[in-house]
Structures are given as C-alpha cells and as structure tokens.
Amino acid sequence: MSGVGGPNPTSWRPGHYVERTAFAWRRTALSLLAVAGAVLRLGTLDGSWLAAALGAGGCLMAVVLVVISLFRHRRTELAVAVGLEPRARWSVITAVLAVGCAGLATLVVLASGG
C-alpha cells in the first residue's frame, strides 16, 4: 500500500472508512461464529451442556453482531452523507460481549479437556 513515495493515492480512499469498518465488524462476527460453532460441536460430542449452551449463545451473538453491523453501517453512511459526525453507541459494548463470549467458551472447552 505504501512504498518509497508514500501511500498510493489510488488504493487509499478516505471516504470509504464506513465500508472498512462494516467489513471489520463482519469479520469479527465470522470469527465469533467459527469459535462458537467449534465450542457447540465439542460440547455436543462430549455431552457438556455448559459448553453446548455457550456455543449456541456465541452463535446467536454472532448473528446479532451481523445485524447490528448492518444497521450501524446504514446509520453511519446516512450521517456521513448529510455531514454529521457518526456516533458509536453500542459498538464497544457489543465488541466486549463478543470477545467475552468467545473467551469464556474457549475456557470451558479447555477446562473440559477438549
């Protein structure tokens, strides 16, 4: 992206940070879904209801994260279009919950010997 002469102006589009942020949220949701799906699978194979419940909760959280990212993307896009400063209301809370669920599910799987 950058070389000797600095950033390439054709690859850096400053007006597209809204899309980059939306893609980052979707990647986070996919990562959470992958971890939660693995925990759910291991929980059902081992018969651990706690791991299965955490895996199912993580899968649900991933879906909620995608829905929130879609609404946030649209709201931010509209705010930028009219010249307002977009606000991140629930973004930090959602991210902390997503990472917390994934971390807790991983700890449960590791503690159960999986």
Image (cartoon, grey):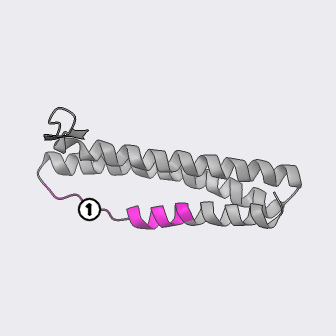
Is residue 86 within the magenta segment?
A: yes
Compared to residue 89, the image places residue 80 above or below, namely above
Q: Secondary structure at mark 1?
A: loop
Q: Amino acid at mark 1?
A: Arg
Is residue 31 within the magenta segment?
A: no
Q: Residue furthest right?
A: 47
Q: Which residue is mark 1?
A: 87
Q: Residue furthest front?
A: 4
Q: Residue at x 62, y 46 (%)?
A: 34
Q: Is residue 100 left or right of residue 83?
A: right
Q: Is residue 109 left or right of residue 101?
A: right
Q: Whole-percent x and y of residue 95? A: 46, 62
Q: Residue furthest top?
A: 10
Q: Residue at x 22, y 58 (%)?
A: 86
- Mark 1: give few (<14), some (14-19) or many (20+) Cα within 10 Å: few
Q: Residue at x 83, y 64 (%)?
A: 112
Residues rendered magenta in the picture: 84-99
Q: Quadrant of the C terminus?
A: bottom right
Q: Is residue 61 left or right of residue 93?
A: right
Q: Nearer the viewer, residue 87 or 98?
A: 98
User: In terms of image quadrants, where is residue 110?
Assistant: bottom right
